[in-house]
């Protein structure tokens, strides 16, 4: 018999190299900690994904090729140090 409790996979947020550092460097230590805590809580609660808007990359490539290529380049450079919430 299986438990009725659902097992959820940890959610992972990955930032392109330098992005998180740039954001954090523009804040005080307390602001940076509050920022990280807010990201963690929004992931944990599911709000992060429910408030997200999917991007149609094919449409973006046709309508704004520069932005498309910038995003693709950033996706290829994703940091190997994600924030994981369990």
Image (spheres, rainbow, N blue to C red):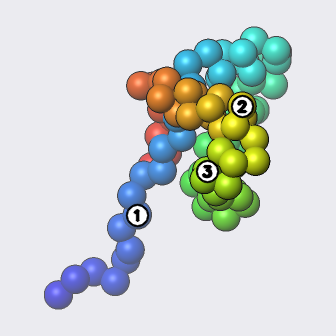
Give the number of the mark in front: 1 or 3: 3
Report the residue marked by disc 2.
66
- Marks 1 and 2 sit apart, C-alpha to C-alpha, by 37 Å
Rendering coords of residue 60 (x, y %): 69, 48
Q: Residue at x 75, y 12 (%)?
A: 25
Q: Residue at x 66, y 21 (%)?
A: 19
> Which numbered tag is attached to residue 57?
3
Mark 2 / mark 3, whichever is N-terminal? 3
Rendering coords of residue 4 (x, y %): 34, 83
Mark 1 / mark 3, whichever is N-terminal? 1
Task: Count neighbours of disc 3 (C-alpha within 10 A) and say few if under 14, some if 14 to 19, many if 20 or more.
Answer: some
Q: Residue at x 61, y 15 (%)?
A: 18
| 59 over 38 or under it: above or below | below
Is 63 left or right of 36, judged from the image as shown? Answer: right
Q: Residue furthest left?
A: 1
Image marks 1 and 3: residues in contact by CB distance under 8 Å:
no
Rendering coords of residue 10 (x, y %): 42, 52
Q: Residue at x 69, y 48 (%)?
A: 62
Report the residue marked by disc 1.
8
């Amino acid at each position: 018999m299986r438990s009725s409790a659902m097992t959820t996979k940890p959610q992972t947020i990955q930032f392109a190299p330098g992005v998180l550092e740039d954001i954090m460097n523009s804040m005080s230590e307390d602001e940076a900690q509050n920022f990280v805590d807010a990201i963690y809580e929004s992931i944990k609660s599911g709000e992060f994904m429910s408030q997200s808007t999917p991007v149609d990359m094919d449409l973006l490539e046709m309508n704004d090729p520069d932005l498309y290529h910038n995003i693709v380049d950033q996706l290829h450079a994703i940091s190997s140090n994600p924030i994981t919430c369990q």
